[in-house]
Amino acid sequence: MLQFAQQIQKALSKSNIPAKGLISVQSDYGVKETVNRLVVAIASKEMTVFLRMDHAENAIKAGLHGLTDQRKGIKKNNGNRNDRLSKCGGKG
């Protein structure tokens, strides 16, 4: 695991990405495939993924059926994204 952490630190030192905080990386794959690949990569380093949260499923259970677009996170409702965002306290 130390070697993996060192590889990450080396990669971060060569980029403009800060070493602390949230790091966003664009994927060439869909959400499900990206997460599956990430889980495999983490497992190959003998680390454990202890939670996978399906935000789309949770949105549906909460009655927020318009919030299931995996690529953009927000699915427009009749052209007005504020319709659905207001139900979860979000801002448009």
Image: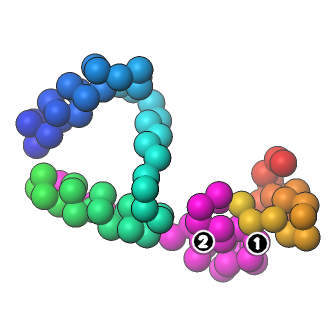
- Furthest residue to the front? 28
Residue 66 included in the magenta stretch of the image? yes
Residue 4, percent across and down? 14, 40
Quarter holding residue 74 = bottom right
Residue 69 is left or right of residue 75, and the answer is left
Which element is circle 1 on? loop
Q: Is residue 19 above or below residue 22?
A: above
Residue 22 included in the magenta stretch of the image? no
Residue under circle 1? Answer: 66
Magenta residues, start to end: 47-73
Is tag 1's residue or tag 2's residue first in the polypeptide sequence?
A: 2
Q: Residues within 10 Å of mark 2 (few under 14, many from 20)?
A: some
Quarter holding residue 15 = top left
Kind of residue indicated by mark 2? Ala
Q: Which mark is residue 13?
A: none
Residue 76 is left or right of residue 36, and the answer is right
Q: Nearer the viewer, residue 55 or 81?
A: 81
Residue under circle 2? Answer: 56
